[in-house]
Amino acid sequence: MPVGGGGAGRCVGQCAEDVTAYMLILPYADNGGDQGSPINASAQKTRVEAGRQLYGDNACSLCHKDDGSTTVLQGESTVYSLHNCPSCTRYDELVAAIGGTMPKGDDGEFGPASCSGDCAKKIADYIWVEYLDGTLTTKGGTLPKVAPVPGKNTLRIKSYESLKAHFSRVFGGENQTLEDSENAFKTIPDFWYIEHELGAVSLNIVANAAVEGCNSLVTQAASGNAEIRANCATWAESMWLRSATQDELNSCVNTATTITDQLNTALKRQQFACASMMMSIPALTF
Ligand code: HEC
């Protein structure tokens, strides 16, 4: 990045490191000026409980669920998760967002028509502590500064488009199950900081697609455990873009040799072992 320009002006080295750090730390980077000092635990609890009450009274949970995790309304834009919303990084912005725009809907449709002033502040207290792990202070609130841990908690589920591309790279050509099921997949969120999701239905389609792909890839049963193990290793390279660990290989061989319920031929078992790798976390995330 940036693309184009034949590589001129590319952001490498320190530049790339700084931008990465900025993107990973962003939610915790800025407490928005002087926040005063932390208040004591029982005062914080009182404010949080008052906010919890208002959160329920003002029907916030109708759209944001009881636990603040997102749910998508028919015909509405994306409802942000209250664990990770654009205004969730600064206390004053959170209060302003609640007071200015929430609750959504026509007057009275979802309980009180507005929640501003003290109402917004109290609910912000609740969201801040319960959903964002923040601390309340005399002038607002602060968030913990958390350093990003490389390789941890950074997996992202692939979208429909990238799953299709991945399946075609692994199996060669179109996967009919995936092609026929686009509507079962959610659209890609508008912003990079909103997690993409696979639902139960789309996950089931991915499993069927993996079975379809593996049935065409594995047309002959390998004869012994060593050969099966070698196949498992090859599948990992193409499906996971990395080598399998010894444990993962053991488990692949195990699947290919021991499951007999419904998988009553060696070929079926090996096809299923292949599919089980294609429907696993390393294949479905990046
Ligand atoms: C009818 C559905 C609905 C109800 C009820 C509702 N919200 Fe929202 N909320 C949304 C939608 C949609 C968005 C994202 C779009 C937007 O911000 O305009 C959102 C966004 C938010 C955001 C993120 C704003 C930002 O820009 O970061 C906060 C915080 C929030 N809501 C809090 C609340 C609180 C607190 C309540 C209860 C007083 C509430 N919401 C009630 C639908 C709702």
Image: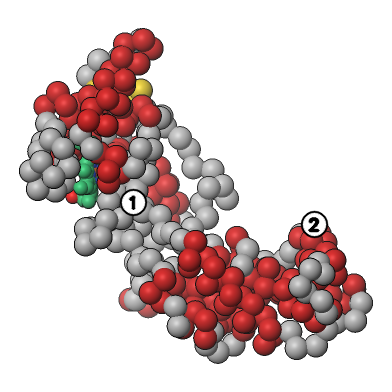
Q: Is residue 137 visible?
A: no
Answer few, some or many: residues within 10 Å of disc 2's Cα (few below 14, many 20 plus, some between 14 and 19).
few
Q: Residue, x 85% and y 82% (percent of image)? A: 222
The amino acid at mark 2 is Asp
Q: Earlier in the sequence, mark 1 or mark 2?
A: 1
Q: CA distance from mark 1 to mark 2?
A: 37 Å
Above-or-below relation of 138 to 242: above
Q: Is residue 277 left or right of residue 121?
A: right
Above-or-below relation of 251 to 270: above
Residue found at the very far left of the displayed protein = 107
Q: Residue, x 9% and y 48% (percent of image)? A: 106
Q: Is residue 13 left or right of residue 41?
A: right
Above-or-below relation of 131 to 188: above
Answer few, some or many: residues within 10 Å of disc 1's Cα (few below 14, many 20 plus, some between 14 and 19).
some
Q: Is mark 2 within 8 Å of ligand 1?
A: no
List the residue tagged with mark 1: 71
List the residue tagged with mark 2: 247
The amino acid at mark 1 is Thr
Q: Is residue 218 visible?
A: yes
Do the residues under discs 1 and 2 have CB atoms within 8 angstroms? no
- Place of residue 142 in the rendered image (x, y in percent of width and height, measured from the top left): 32, 26
